[in-house]
Image: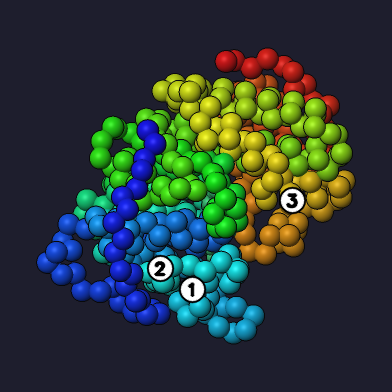
Amino acid sequence: MSQTIKSQQQPPLELQAGRECPAVNSNDGHKSRVAVIGSGNWGTVAAKLIASNTLKLPSFHDEVRMWVFEETLPTGEKLTDVINKTNENVKYLPGIKLGKNIVADPDLENAVKDANMLVFVTPHQFMEGICKRLVGKIKEGAEAISLIKGMEVKTEGPCMISSLISNQLMINCCVLMGANIANDIAVEKLSEATIGYREKGEIAEKWAQLFSTPYFMVSAVEDVEGVELCGTLKNVVAIAAGLVDGLEMGNNTKAAIMRIGLREMKTFSKLLFPSVKDSTFFESCGVGDLITTCLGGRNRKVSEAFARNGGRRSFDDLEAEMLQGQKLQGVSTARDIYGVLRHRGWLELFPLFSTVHEISTCRLPPSAIVKYNLQKPVLT
Ligand SMILES: NC(=O)c1ccc[n+]([C@@H]2O[C@H](COP(=O)([O-])OP(=O)(O)OC[C@H]3O[C@@H](n4cnc5c(N)ncnc54)[C@H](O)[C@@H]3O)[C@@H](O)[C@H]2O)c1
């Protein structure tokens, strides 16, 4: 289901730094208000995309609130103040001007209080705390979408981030994943994304409308878990691809790792959620995201450095040095998946996933990524 956006252009609001939401006038009663919870690299680009559309779409308020986890910059200024003053997220998306209708807000509750469309886009490890803070604080009837790649693992089993949001906040939650390296979308290079929704209806279309631009092509499938697991699991395969790059094994080996990784992604997803559809793996969220993440992407890059150092420097060290505050997802996801595999007695079925974890925790050397029995057949 590809969406086209309406073209009616509305005059932009001249929003001033940090000011309160404009008073809602009687004609605005039915308009949707959007808040973006998160302002890292992808969070900021997502806000930029959305804000370009809220200006054009009459069914949305122009203003997009973006919650910022407040930081003090080396200059002594607050990141929020700088974003509102310069229309630029100088820390996580330097050099890119954001729409003036984006208002950065360091107060989480204030950022969401008037919104009925909530876009969650923070590193997954912070989501449980964020949801706890938002219980009872969001507008009745609000809808959510998660752009977050990762999962929470609890003693009772894995919990997808969309389920965490739905269960804690008692709201419906769609997901949006895809071959989306944020810096490329920031400069408006063509890319695709997939929305996963639970039930056919207006909301999936509304989300597609909010995100679609001529350079960001959005389709939608009825498979929340499939889309979200693709986005989550490919980061583990990207760690394996980075190891192969660091070992200078070449493209045949990398293709093998990607193919085996995709097979494990599909098998794991279907074992956890039998409703997951095969066709989802052929969408942008599946094979598209896997390819881009294994060719570019921060997980691949840091993992390559790990292998080049012969595993002597930890992923934590390299993350801090190479990513300047951005977060690596693949290593923690590999650890979480390993916990699920061990708990369920599935370790032998997933040699690539388990080897990535054993390498990242230094129980195996980087070279083990091509020495383990990766050919062992897994269930399909
Ligand atoms: N960057 C990409 O290209 C990209 C693309 C698609 C999806 N994603 C996914 O989007 C999600 C967000 O990634 P990102 O790239 O926007 O973030 P990021 O890794 O660039 O930045 C980290 C963010 O976390 C915030 N933060 C730090 N400590 C925090 C805390 N204690 N509580 C709350 N927030 C805290 C920082 O302020 C910053 O905004 C991740 O799940 C990621 O996998 C990223």
The mark lying in front, picked from 3 and 1, is 1
Residue 223, percent across and down?
A: 40, 30
Q: Is residue 196 left or right of residue 141?
A: right
Q: Residue at x 39, y 36 (%)?
A: 2
Query: In this orientation, does residue 339 appear?
Result: no
Q: Which residue is mark 2?
A: 102
- Can you tell me whether the CB of the residue at mark 2 lies under 8 Å from the nearest atom of ligand 1? no
Q: Are marks 2 and 1 in contact (CB under 8 Å)?
A: yes
Q: Are marks 3 and 1 in contact (CB under 8 Å)?
A: no
Q: Which residue is mark 1?
A: 87
Mark 2 vs mark 1: which is more N-terminal?
1
Q: Residue at x 51, y 78 (%)?
A: 86
Mark 3 vs mark 1: which is more N-terminal?
1
Within 10 angstroms of label 3, few (less than 14), some, or many (20 or more) residues?
many
Q: CA distance from mark 2 to mark 3?
A: 32 Å
Q: Residue at x 28, y 73 (%)?
A: 21
Residue 224, percent across and down?
A: 41, 34
Element carrying mark 1: loop
Q: Quadrant of the C terminus?
A: top right
Within 10 angstroms of label 2, few (less than 14), some, or many (20 or more) residues?
many
Q: Which residue is mark 3?
A: 302
Mark 2 vs mark 3: which is more N-terminal?
2
Element carrying mark 3: helix
Query: In this orientation, does residue 240 appear?
Result: yes
Residue 312, percent across and down?
A: 85, 50
Q: Is residue 141 left or right of residue 50?
A: left
Callout 1 amino acid: Asn
Q: Quadrant of residue 266?
A: top right
In front of the other: 59 or 374? 59
The mark lying in front, picked from 2 and 3, is 2
Q: In the displayed structure, would residue 35 be above or below residue 344? A: below
Callout 2 amino acid: Ile
